[in-house]
Image (spheres, rainbow, N blue to C red):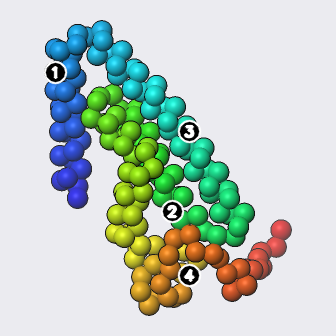
Amino acid sequence: MLAVLILLLLSVPLLELFVIVQVAGGLGAGQTILLLVAVSVVGAWMVRRSGLGVLNQIRTRLAQGEIPGNELVDGLLILLAAAFMLTPGFLTDAVGLLMLFPPTRKAVRSILVRRYAKRVDIAGWSGAQGGAGGPRRFGAPLDAESFTKDTDDRTD
């Protein structure tokens, strides 16, 4: 995993630089810079819009007493998209913009949930089959009556 990360950290900037030089060769340096700035501005607007929408969905799910699992993963993906948008270059901007579109984000979310659901343990509920609470899906209602309040024996 570390080798893949090092390879990405070395190859992505070189690839971005190659693409920027190719675009600048076709359009000119000034227009390439304007295009990079325009994509960043549009991306920032989309990140803000998507982020606020997901935040409202999280609030709604919490108000209904449900765990906002899918919405939290969407929030993480939007944060990752924002990081891609902050990185100068056309390729990272394209990946960031793709993750801001709900259908693409939903596909990435489903892959992540399938891959990591067995590792998630929320309040004694495991995503693994046969876990503490049996199989659990993201966004399922919380059973508040099964939880007990912890007492604090510390003195002030």
Marks 2/1 in contact by CB < 8 Å: the verdict is no
The disc, 2 or 1, on the residue closer to the chain's N-terminal end is 1
What residue is at 44 percent from the left and 43 percent from the top? 100
**Can residue 113 be seen in the rendering of this structure?**
yes
Which quarter of the figure is the C terminus placed in?
bottom right
Task: State whether residue 77 is above or below residue 145.
Answer: above
Name the amino acid type tagged 1. Answer: Gln
User: Which percent across, then down, holds residue 61?
Assistant: 65, 63
The disc, 1 or 4, on the residue closer to the chain's N-terminal end is 1
> Label for residue 70?
2
What residue is at 39 percent from the left and 34 percent from the top? 85
- Quadrant assignment, res 38: top left
For label 1, the SS is helix
Judging by the rendered image, the residue that carries numbered circle 4 is 124
In this rendering, which labeled residue sits more in front, label 4 or label 3? Answer: 3
What residue is at 76 percent from the left and 77 percent from the top? 152
- Rounded to the nearest whole Å, what is the CA distance between mark 2 and mark 4? 19 Å
The disc, 4 or 3, on the residue closer to the chain's N-terminal end is 3
Name, please, the residue furthest toward the front. Answer: 103
User: Which percent across, then down, holds residue 42?
Assistant: 46, 28
- Rounded to the nearest whole Å, what is the CA distance between mark 4 and mark 3? 34 Å
> Label for residue 49?
3
- Rounded to the nearest whole Å, what is the CA distance between mark 3 and mark 1? 32 Å
Task: State whether residue 81 is above or below residue 26.
Answer: below
Judging by the rendered image, the residue that carries numbered circle 1 is 22
User: Which percent across, then down, holds residue 12?
Assistant: 22, 38
Structural crowding at the residue carrying mark 3, measured as other residues with C-alpha within 10 Å and reported as few (<14), some (14–19) or many (≥20): few
**Can residue 121 be seen in the rendering of this structure?**
no
